[in-house]
Amino acid sequence: MVKSGTIILNTAARFLMPLQLMFSVFLLLRGHDEPGGGFIAGLVAAGAFTLYLFAFGVSATREVLRMLDPRDLIGAGLLLGMISIVPAWFMDQPFLTAQWWTIPVIDFKASTPLIFDVGVYLAVLGSVIGMVMALMEVDKDEP
């Protein structure tokens, strides 16, 4: 199952992928105070890339990712997760205490939980895409 070849799946993948990615960003930004967050947003984004993968194959999906290896996404996510604990130490507060900053120009509240959620988002996205791509490449090699 390298390439589907159906016009319905190809068309649906082209239209649904941007919508799913926008919805995943919405879930990511909404997730601290209401349902959502990095994990479910990462799964929705991975679903978008998986749909594209099923429609167009592994090589086309790698082109969409623009030279980003899924392992790099996992590493960046883990790094952001670790960076999110540092501001509490500089403020002389207990480990993993949330810190909040208001960005006045756009009236946006940035926080360490948001940094952590972005890290979870990237780690989940990289993990799922990496697994699905590996399975698709193994399926391609079999007769």
Image (cartoon, grey):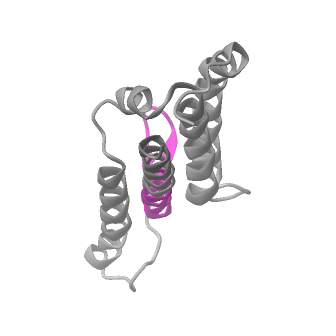
Taking the image as shown, residue 21 lies to the left or right of residue 74, namely right
In depth, the one of 2 and 17 nearer the eye is 2
Taking the image as shown, residue 14 lies to the left or right of residue 101, namely right
Magenta span has 136? Answer: no
- Quadrant hosting residue 50: top right
Q: Position of residue 22 (x, y in %)?
A: 60, 31
Of all residues, the one furthest to the bottom in this rendering is 94
Q: Residue at x 38, y 66 (%)?
A: 81
Q: Residue at x 46, y 41 (%)?
A: 140
Q: Residue at x 43, y 38 (%)?
A: 104
Q: Position of residue 65 (x, y in %)?
A: 38, 33
- Quadrant hosting residue 46: top right
Figure quadrant of the N terminus: top right
Q: Residue at x 48, y 60 (%)?
A: 120
Magenta span has 122? Answer: yes
In depth, the one of 4 and 53 nearer the eye is 4
Q: Is residue 95 above or below residue 7?
A: below
In depth, the one of 107 and 46 nearer the eye is 46
Q: Which residues are magenta?
A: 101-125
Q: Position of residue 87 (x, y in %)?
A: 32, 69
Q: Is residue 16 above or below residue 109?
A: above
